Image (cartoon, rainbow, N blue to C red):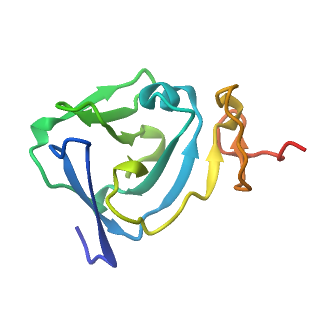
Amino acid sequence: MGKADDILTGSCLCGAVTFEIETPTSYCCHCHCSNCRRAHGAAFVTWLGFDDEDFRLTSNPDDLVNYHTDTGATRSFCRKCGTTLFYKSPRWEGENNVALGNVHGEADRVPEHHMYVDHKAKWHQITDSLPQKGGETGEEPKARPS
């Protein structure tokens, strides 16, 4: 880890998996893709992105389990309590993500946009004014519904 502006800390629900992230982080967004929705059992998940080099696992690595998806991504969770923690995709080389709800205290940024809105849960309505992205990549700007 290099020189940090600040260090974010976090953990899973039971505290077996703990981590540190140097700021500044890269981005923060709400993801509505079906894989994130199923992995978290929620309408969407809020990810905080950061560079791999700015991350340090501060607990026993054996408590972190990796699930490799059919898209080549890795979703990591706690072996003891099942908390979904991290997401890493070959699509964004050198980047990692933590589910924002697992960060202790305030992060250095707030959600900036919604992505994969074309895949959002039909029973959920986006009611904030954040930009929405979708399309084939999940990251193409979308016009807000009137």
Quadrant position of residue 116:
top right
Residue 113: % across, % down = 64, 53
Residue 27: % across, % down = 51, 59
Residue drawn at x 38%, y 40% as measured from the top left: 87
102 in relation to 85, above or below: below
Residue ranking furthest to the right = 146
Residue 12 shown left or right of residue 36 in the figure: left
Residue 74 makes an appearance in the image: yes
Q: Nearer the viewer, residue 20 or 51?
A: 20
101 in relation to 71, above or below: below
- In the picture, the quarter occupied by the C terminus is top right
Quadrant position of residue 125:
top right
112 in relation to 3, above or below: above
Residue 107 shown left or right of residue 82 in the figure: right
Residue drawn at x 35%, y 64% as measured from the top left: 105
- Number of marks present in the image shown: 0
Q: Nearer the viewer, residue 133 or 136?
A: 133
Residue 107: % across, % down = 41, 65
Quadrant position of residue 43:
top right
Residue 142: % across, % down = 78, 45
Q: Nearer the viewer, residue 9 or 81?
A: 81
81 in relation to 23, above or below: above
